[in-house]
Image (cartoon, rainbow, N blue to C red):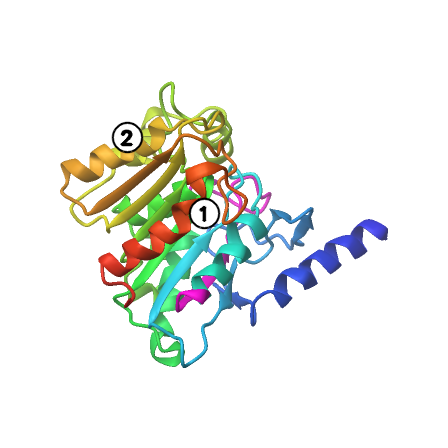
Amino acid sequence: MKKLLTILLSFAYLLTQGQESILLYDTIMPNSKGLKLLDSIANERVYQVAEPRIIPFFVSKQENSGTAVLIIPGGGYARLAYVISGTQLAKWFNTIGINAFVLLHRLPNSPDVIARSLAPLQDVQRAMRVIRSKTAEWHIDPGRIGVMGCSAGGHLAASLSSIERPIKVLGDAIDQLSSKPNFSVLVSPVITMKGDHAHQGSVDNLLGKVADDSQKELFSLQAQVTERTPPTFLVHAQNDKTVSVQNSLLYYQALLEHKITASLHIFPQGGHAIALVNNPGSTATWPSILAAWLHEIKMIKP
Protein backbone atom coordinates (compact mmCIF):
# COMPACT_ATOMS: atom_id res chain seq x y z
CA MET A 1 0.00 0.00 0.00
CA LYS A 2 2.85 2.37 0.89
CA LYS A 3 4.56 1.65 -2.44
CA LEU A 4 1.34 2.28 -4.39
CA LEU A 5 0.84 5.58 -2.56
CA THR A 6 4.39 6.62 -3.44
CA ILE A 7 3.77 5.88 -7.12
CA LEU A 8 0.49 7.82 -7.13
CA LEU A 9 2.01 10.81 -5.36
CA SER A 10 4.95 10.81 -7.78
CA PHE A 11 2.57 10.74 -10.73
CA ALA A 12 0.49 13.56 -9.25
CA TYR A 13 3.66 15.62 -8.82
CA LEU A 14 4.61 15.00 -12.44
CA LEU A 15 1.26 16.19 -13.75
CA THR A 16 1.32 19.37 -11.66
CA GLN A 17 4.53 20.44 -13.37
CA GLY A 18 2.74 21.08 -16.65
CA GLN A 19 -0.79 22.05 -17.55
CA GLU A 20 -2.35 18.78 -18.53
CA SER A 21 -1.29 15.40 -19.82
CA ILE A 22 -2.04 14.92 -23.52
CA LEU A 23 -2.30 11.30 -24.62
CA LEU A 24 -0.72 10.41 -27.96
CA TYR A 25 -3.31 7.74 -28.76
CA ASP A 26 -7.02 8.10 -27.98
CA THR A 27 -8.22 4.53 -28.38
CA ILE A 28 -5.91 2.22 -30.31
CA MET A 29 -2.25 2.03 -29.29
CA PRO A 30 -0.01 0.63 -32.05
CA ASN A 31 2.59 -2.04 -31.38
CA SER A 32 0.67 -3.16 -28.28
CA LYS A 33 -0.45 -6.52 -26.91
CA GLY A 34 -3.41 -4.83 -25.25
CA LEU A 35 -2.19 -5.32 -21.69
CA LYS A 36 -3.47 -2.97 -19.00
CA LEU A 37 -0.40 -1.49 -17.30
CA LEU A 38 0.19 1.09 -14.59
CA ASP A 39 2.76 3.86 -14.58
CA SER A 40 5.77 3.10 -12.40
CA ILE A 41 7.46 6.24 -11.05
CA ALA A 42 10.03 6.55 -8.26
CA ASN A 43 12.94 8.85 -7.37
CA GLU A 44 12.11 11.27 -10.21
CA ARG A 45 12.38 8.43 -12.73
CA VAL A 46 9.65 6.77 -14.81
CA TYR A 47 10.24 3.02 -15.13
CA GLN A 48 7.03 2.11 -16.97
CA VAL A 49 4.73 4.23 -19.10
CA ALA A 50 1.19 2.90 -19.34
CA GLU A 51 -0.01 5.46 -21.90
CA PRO A 52 2.52 7.53 -23.86
CA ARG A 53 1.85 11.25 -23.58
CA ILE A 54 3.26 14.75 -23.63
CA ILE A 55 3.25 17.19 -20.73
CA PRO A 56 2.91 20.77 -22.04
CA PHE A 57 4.62 23.85 -20.65
CA PHE A 58 3.11 26.83 -22.44
CA VAL A 59 4.53 30.34 -22.58
CA SER A 60 2.26 33.28 -21.76
CA LYS A 61 0.58 34.97 -24.71
CA GLN A 62 2.75 38.07 -24.26
CA GLU A 63 6.03 36.10 -24.27
CA ASN A 64 5.18 33.41 -26.81
CA SER A 65 7.74 33.37 -29.64
CA GLY A 66 5.70 30.86 -31.64
CA THR A 67 8.51 28.31 -31.30
CA ALA A 68 8.14 24.95 -29.56
CA VAL A 69 10.40 22.07 -28.54
CA LEU A 70 9.67 18.43 -27.78
CA ILE A 71 11.91 17.27 -24.90
CA ILE A 72 12.90 13.61 -24.50
CA PRO A 73 14.31 12.65 -21.09
CA GLY A 74 17.32 10.34 -20.85
CA GLY A 75 17.67 7.08 -18.99
CA GLY A 76 19.38 4.50 -21.17
CA TYR A 77 16.05 3.32 -22.63
CA ALA A 78 15.42 1.69 -19.23
CA ARG A 79 13.85 4.68 -17.47
CA LEU A 80 13.03 8.35 -18.06
CA ALA A 81 14.70 10.99 -15.88
CA TYR A 82 11.75 13.31 -16.38
CA VAL A 83 12.87 16.06 -13.97
CA ILE A 84 16.56 16.71 -14.58
CA SER A 85 16.31 16.10 -18.34
CA GLY A 86 12.65 16.97 -18.78
CA THR A 87 10.64 19.41 -16.69
CA GLN A 88 13.63 21.54 -15.62
CA LEU A 89 14.59 22.07 -19.24
CA ALA A 90 10.99 22.80 -20.23
CA LYS A 91 10.79 25.63 -17.69
CA TRP A 92 14.06 27.07 -18.98
CA PHE A 93 12.80 27.07 -22.55
CA ASN A 94 9.75 28.97 -21.33
CA THR A 95 12.04 31.76 -20.06
CA ILE A 96 13.23 32.41 -23.62
CA GLY A 97 9.72 32.34 -25.09
CA ILE A 98 9.65 28.73 -26.28
CA ASN A 99 6.73 26.39 -25.60
CA ALA A 100 7.92 23.00 -24.38
CA PHE A 101 6.48 19.49 -24.28
CA VAL A 102 8.04 16.71 -22.19
CA LEU A 103 7.57 13.29 -23.79
CA LEU A 104 6.86 10.17 -21.78
CA HIS A 105 7.30 7.42 -24.36
CA ARG A 106 6.97 3.68 -23.96
CA LEU A 107 10.16 1.94 -22.93
CA PRO A 108 11.41 -1.00 -25.03
CA ASN A 109 11.25 -3.39 -22.06
CA SER A 110 7.52 -2.81 -21.53
CA PRO A 111 5.69 -6.16 -21.32
CA ASP A 112 2.99 -4.68 -23.57
CA VAL A 113 5.29 -3.83 -26.50
CA ILE A 114 5.46 -6.20 -29.49
CA ALA A 115 8.43 -4.76 -31.45
CA ARG A 116 10.66 -3.28 -28.75
CA SER A 117 12.92 -1.15 -30.95
CA LEU A 118 10.04 0.60 -32.74
CA ALA A 119 7.95 1.72 -29.75
CA PRO A 120 10.02 4.80 -28.76
CA LEU A 121 10.33 5.91 -32.40
CA GLN A 122 6.58 5.43 -32.98
CA ASP A 123 5.78 7.51 -29.92
CA VAL A 124 8.18 10.36 -30.65
CA GLN A 125 6.96 10.62 -34.26
CA ARG A 126 3.36 10.65 -33.04
CA ALA A 127 4.20 13.31 -30.42
CA MET A 128 5.63 15.62 -33.07
CA ARG A 129 2.55 15.13 -35.22
CA VAL A 130 0.21 15.78 -32.29
CA ILE A 131 1.98 19.08 -31.61
CA ARG A 132 1.71 20.04 -35.29
CA SER A 133 -2.00 19.20 -35.25
CA LYS A 134 -2.55 21.80 -32.50
CA THR A 135 -0.38 24.65 -33.78
CA ALA A 136 -3.27 26.99 -34.54
CA GLU A 137 -4.86 26.37 -31.15
CA TRP A 138 -1.55 26.74 -29.30
CA HIS A 139 -0.24 29.68 -31.39
CA ILE A 140 2.83 27.77 -32.56
CA ASP A 141 4.54 28.12 -35.93
CA PRO A 142 4.50 24.63 -37.55
CA GLY A 143 7.84 25.48 -39.17
CA ARG A 144 9.54 26.18 -35.81
CA ILE A 145 9.14 23.01 -33.79
CA GLY A 146 12.33 21.35 -32.58
CA VAL A 147 13.36 18.35 -30.54
CA MET A 148 15.77 18.03 -27.64
CA GLY A 149 17.13 14.94 -25.94
CA CYS A 150 19.74 14.01 -23.35
CA SER A 151 21.75 10.78 -23.38
CA ALA A 152 19.43 8.02 -24.70
CA GLY A 153 16.84 10.77 -25.13
CA GLY A 154 19.40 12.34 -27.46
CA HIS A 155 19.49 9.10 -29.41
CA LEU A 156 15.71 9.19 -29.83
CA ALA A 157 15.83 12.88 -30.77
CA ALA A 158 18.48 12.14 -33.40
CA SER A 159 16.41 9.17 -34.61
CA LEU A 160 13.44 11.50 -35.12
CA SER A 161 15.72 13.93 -36.95
CA SER A 162 17.54 11.53 -39.25
CA ILE A 163 15.78 8.20 -39.74
CA GLU A 164 13.82 8.44 -42.98
CA ARG A 165 11.22 5.93 -41.87
CA PRO A 166 7.96 7.68 -41.03
CA ILE A 167 5.72 5.22 -39.21
CA LYS A 168 2.01 5.61 -39.90
CA VAL A 169 0.44 4.25 -36.77
CA LEU A 170 -3.30 4.93 -36.94
CA GLY A 171 -3.96 6.26 -40.42
CA ASP A 172 -5.85 9.27 -39.04
CA ALA A 173 -5.46 12.94 -39.98
CA ILE A 174 -2.65 13.41 -37.44
CA ASP A 175 -0.68 10.63 -39.16
CA GLN A 176 -0.59 12.67 -42.36
CA LEU A 177 1.43 15.48 -40.74
CA SER A 178 5.22 15.64 -40.82
CA SER A 179 7.15 14.23 -37.88
CA LYS A 180 10.40 15.90 -38.95
CA PRO A 181 11.63 18.53 -36.44
CA ASN A 182 12.92 21.93 -37.57
CA PHE A 183 15.91 21.89 -35.23
CA SER A 184 17.60 19.43 -32.91
CA VAL A 185 19.40 19.84 -29.59
CA LEU A 186 21.44 16.86 -28.37
CA VAL A 187 23.10 16.76 -24.95
CA SER A 188 25.58 13.93 -24.27
CA PRO A 189 23.74 11.88 -26.90
CA VAL A 190 23.97 8.18 -27.58
CA ILE A 191 24.47 8.01 -31.35
CA THR A 192 26.04 4.76 -32.48
CA MET A 193 24.76 1.26 -31.75
CA LYS A 194 27.85 -0.55 -32.96
CA GLY A 195 31.59 -0.57 -32.35
CA ASP A 196 33.72 0.47 -29.42
CA HIS A 197 31.91 3.77 -28.84
CA ALA A 198 28.41 2.32 -28.44
CA HIS A 199 26.70 2.65 -25.06
CA GLN A 200 26.01 -1.01 -24.44
CA GLY A 201 23.20 -0.44 -21.97
CA SER A 202 21.22 1.57 -24.51
CA VAL A 203 21.95 -1.00 -27.23
CA ASP A 204 20.72 -3.89 -25.08
CA ASN A 205 17.64 -2.04 -23.83
CA LEU A 206 16.55 -0.75 -27.23
CA LEU A 207 17.47 -3.65 -29.51
CA GLY A 208 17.75 -6.58 -27.09
CA LYS A 209 20.86 -8.48 -26.13
CA VAL A 210 20.85 -10.34 -29.44
CA ALA A 211 20.44 -7.66 -32.12
CA ASP A 212 21.16 -8.24 -35.80
CA ASP A 213 23.47 -6.00 -37.79
CA SER A 214 20.64 -4.39 -39.77
CA GLN A 215 19.00 -3.13 -36.57
CA LYS A 216 22.30 -1.80 -35.27
CA GLU A 217 22.88 -0.04 -38.59
CA LEU A 218 19.42 1.55 -38.64
CA PHE A 219 19.85 2.95 -35.15
CA SER A 220 23.47 4.04 -35.63
CA LEU A 221 22.43 7.56 -36.45
CA GLN A 222 25.67 8.81 -37.97
CA ALA A 223 24.74 6.50 -40.87
CA GLN A 224 21.20 7.90 -41.15
CA VAL A 225 21.93 11.61 -41.59
CA THR A 226 20.58 13.02 -44.86
CA GLU A 227 20.16 16.43 -46.46
CA ARG A 228 16.79 16.57 -44.67
CA THR A 229 18.29 16.32 -41.18
CA PRO A 230 17.54 19.61 -39.38
CA PRO A 231 20.08 22.11 -37.98
CA THR A 232 21.64 20.54 -34.89
CA PHE A 233 23.23 21.77 -31.66
CA LEU A 234 25.45 19.28 -29.79
CA VAL A 235 26.86 19.43 -26.25
CA HIS A 236 29.17 16.82 -24.72
CA ALA A 237 31.87 16.56 -22.05
CA GLN A 238 35.31 15.25 -22.92
CA ASN A 239 35.43 13.35 -19.62
CA ASP A 240 32.09 11.59 -20.11
CA LYS A 241 32.81 8.01 -19.03
CA THR A 242 29.26 6.75 -19.70
CA VAL A 243 28.63 7.84 -23.29
CA SER A 244 31.83 8.46 -25.20
CA VAL A 245 32.27 11.92 -26.68
CA GLN A 246 33.00 10.09 -29.93
CA ASN A 247 29.23 9.72 -30.33
CA SER A 248 28.79 13.47 -30.80
CA LEU A 249 31.88 13.61 -33.04
CA LEU A 250 30.50 10.86 -35.29
CA TYR A 251 27.18 12.66 -35.68
CA TYR A 252 28.80 16.05 -36.24
CA GLN A 253 31.04 14.63 -38.96
CA ALA A 254 27.99 13.18 -40.70
CA LEU A 255 26.21 16.55 -40.46
CA LEU A 256 29.24 18.26 -42.03
CA GLU A 257 29.33 15.74 -44.86
CA HIS A 258 25.69 16.49 -45.66
CA LYS A 259 26.16 20.27 -45.29
CA ILE A 260 23.76 20.53 -42.36
CA THR A 261 24.02 23.61 -40.16
CA ALA A 262 25.55 22.35 -36.92
CA SER A 263 27.13 23.68 -33.74
CA LEU A 264 29.30 21.35 -31.65
CA HIS A 265 30.44 22.20 -28.11
CA ILE A 266 32.78 19.81 -26.30
CA PHE A 267 33.65 20.92 -22.79
CA PRO A 268 36.52 19.46 -20.74
CA GLN A 269 34.36 18.81 -17.67
CA GLY A 270 30.85 17.67 -16.87
CA GLY A 271 31.03 13.91 -17.27
CA HIS A 272 27.65 12.42 -18.05
CA ALA A 273 25.92 14.82 -15.69
CA ILE A 274 25.51 17.89 -17.89
CA ALA A 275 22.24 19.43 -16.79
CA LEU A 276 20.70 22.88 -16.77
CA VAL A 277 22.58 24.06 -13.66
CA ASN A 278 25.48 23.12 -11.38
CA ASN A 279 27.88 22.37 -14.23
CA PRO A 280 31.63 22.79 -13.65
CA GLY A 281 33.75 25.49 -15.28
CA SER A 282 32.94 26.54 -18.82
CA THR A 283 30.31 23.80 -19.14
CA ALA A 284 27.97 26.14 -17.24
CA THR A 285 27.78 28.37 -20.33
CA TRP A 286 26.01 25.88 -22.59
CA PRO A 287 22.41 27.12 -22.02
CA SER A 288 23.33 30.69 -22.97
CA ILE A 289 25.19 29.43 -26.05
CA LEU A 290 22.11 27.41 -27.03
CA ALA A 291 19.88 30.48 -26.70
CA ALA A 292 22.27 32.46 -28.93
CA TRP A 293 22.25 29.63 -31.49
CA LEU A 294 18.46 29.52 -31.58
CA HIS A 295 18.52 33.25 -32.34
CA GLU A 296 21.18 32.66 -34.98
CA ILE A 297 19.11 30.08 -36.88
CA LYS A 298 16.05 32.35 -36.55
CA MET A 299 14.01 30.03 -34.37
CA ILE A 300 13.49 32.85 -31.86
CA LYS A 301 13.98 36.59 -32.10
CA PRO A 302 16.61 38.44 -30.03
Residue 225 or residue 99, whichever sits in front:
99
Locate residue 130 relative to residue 259 in the image: left or right: right
Locate residue 176 relative to residue 5 in the image: left or right: left
Classify residue 178 by image quadrant.
bottom left
Q: Amino acid at mark 1?
A: Pro
Checking the image for residue 120, the label placed there is: 1
Q: Residue 16 in the image: state x and y as whole percent.
A: 63, 67
Q: Amino acid at mark 2?
A: Leu
Residue 122 or residue 240, whichever sits in front:
240
Q: Main secondary structure of the magenta part?
A: loop
| Quadrant of image for the C terminus | bottom left
Give the class, few, some or many, for how many residues have Cα within 10 Å of label 2's Cα (few <14, many ≥20): some
Q: Look at mark 2 in the image and give the residue it sits on.
A: 250
* Magenta range: 95-120
* Direction front: furthest residue: 281
Locate residue 79 relative to residue 128 in the image: left or right: right
Residue 121 visible within the image: no
